[in-house]
Image (cartoon, grey):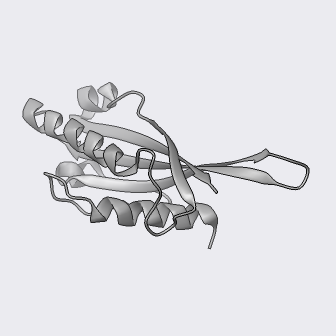
Amino acid sequence: MATIIDIANAVTADVNRGSFDIEFTAVMMLLPEFELKDMKTLKVTVVPKAVKFENMTRDTSSREVQIDIGVQQKTADSERIAALLQLVEDIIAVFDRKRLTDYPSALCVKVAIDPIYDPEHLRQMRQFTSVITLTFKVL
């Protein structure tokens, strides 16, 4: 299987091994599309994003793999939004500067969330959407 798929599956497994205040099961999807009516239930989706190769020497290269983790739920409740933001931070803690359990040659070297949530989704659809981008160096 492609390295990026293996890493996405390992990310999904590590998220599902985590202990969080909100219950959910993360799923890996290549094409995450949901109907708004189905978003009342929290969705945590792992999606392969990008692979970057860089020359190190004439004979070797390094690889960086990016994986997105989407956290989405239809809500306009301020307390629930705060809890979902905490969940996003708790998911980040699972990966920040750590190796994947099922793919130990992948080390998380960067985490980005920009913006922390999508204000347009919240305003227009009353849906919380946050996307965490993890960058792994494949050693």
In this view, the residue in front, 45 or 32, is 45
Residue 10, picture quadrant: bottom left
**Residue 32 appears anywhere in the view:** no
Residue 32: x, y in percent? 42, 55
> In what quadrant of the picture does the C terminus appear?
bottom right
Identify the residue at image location x=57%, y=62%: 105
Does residue 85 sit above or below 20 in this rendering? above
In the foreground, 101 or 81: 101
Where in the figure is residue 40, as x and y percent of width and height?
17, 50
Picture coordinates of residue 82, whole percent (x, y): 15, 33
Q: Residue at x 26, y 45 (%)?
A: 90
Which image quadrant for residue 116? top left
Q: On the picture, is 82 further left or further right than 104?
A: left
Quarter assignment of residue 113: top left
Q: With respect to residue 61, does 112 lie above or below?
A: above
The count of marks equals: 0
Please give the name of the residue rendered at 42% of the width and 29% of the height, measured from the top-left corner. 114
Determine the residue positioned at 15% across, 52% down.
22
Q: Residue furthest right?
A: 58
7 left or right of 138 in image: left
**Residue 106 visible somewhere in the drawing:** yes
Which of the image's four quarters has the N terminus? Answer: bottom right
Residue 108 picture location, percent across and down:
50, 48
